[in-house]
Image (tube, helix red, strand yellow):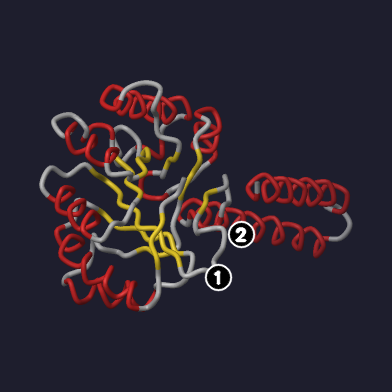
Amino acid sequence: MKFRKVRSAYIAIVLICMVLYFVFRNTHHYVVDAFSIIISISTLYFLFLLIDGAIHIQRNFFFFSHNQLPDDTEKKLVLSFDDGIHPLLTPRILDILHAHQIKALFFIIGKNIEGNENILQRMFNEGHTIGNHSDEHSFWFDVQSSKGMLAEIVSMNKKVSVVLGDPFKPKYFRPPYGVSNPALAKAIHKSGMISIGWNLRSMDTTMHSKEQLLQKLKSETKPGCIVLLHDRCEITAEALTDYIVFCKAQGYTFTTIT
């Protein structure tokens, strides 16, 4: 992936500069200073690319994620919901989706399944795609080893299988917070799962009003969108019907990832 190419280029630049530094250090001091500057700039740029790639899943820097539908010319959308299952809000959202005959994509946190097995079963029965959003979704998920990340992915899948029965298990994974890194790349590869990102982030976790959320969604909706929402947010449940009505009026249809 991009990370490997960038890392190789950075190492090559540093090694070349170090060799030339030792060759010219006793003869051309201005050249030596230039090599030091090149290494410093390269290091800063390399760090910038690492951070930027880690926080923007759309860059596909460490591993590939599907961040939009393959055909972005058709007026189709995917509604995806993170952080479920919420015992009160998720059923409200399922009711709205059922009323409009829309199949969505739910990325569930494993620890939220206990006590909400009936909601998970309902999602499955109504044809929604169930995805893996890790088992704990802790703040420290991204600093774990690849082994720890893989353990969370596997644990969540097992909890789903217990409820829905073997051999069913989620195929799709969305990284907590959308953060990526080399350890997670290794864990996803070992799990055999497919990473799903987004290209329309609703920011519903920080919005202050239904109108504000709708304005952002309406202004950024485009063909092929994978929309990121959260089924733990009251404001999302409040705005969902109006957003669906708007999209249909604009000629959009809703699909899910299969």
Image spot of residue 13 (x, y percent): 76, 52
For this orientation, the residue located farthest to the left is: 88
Mark found first going from the N terminus, 2 or 1: 2
* Mark 2 Cα-neighbour bin, 10 Å: few <14, some 14–19, many ≥20: few
Residue 113 or residue 254, whichever sits in front: 254
Residue found 17% across the figure and 60% down from its top: 237
Residue 225 to residue 150: above or below: below
- Whether residue 77 sits left or right of residue 185 in the image: it is left
Can you tell which mark lies on residue 40?
A: none
Q: Secondary structure at mark 1?
A: loop
- Amino acid on which the number 2 mark rests in the picture: Tyr
Residue found 53% across the figure and 31% down from its top: 192
Image spot of residue 7 (x, y percent): 67, 46
Q: Secondary structure at mark 2?
A: helix
Q: Where is mark 2, residue-wise? A: 45
Q: Where is mark 1, residue-wise? A: 73
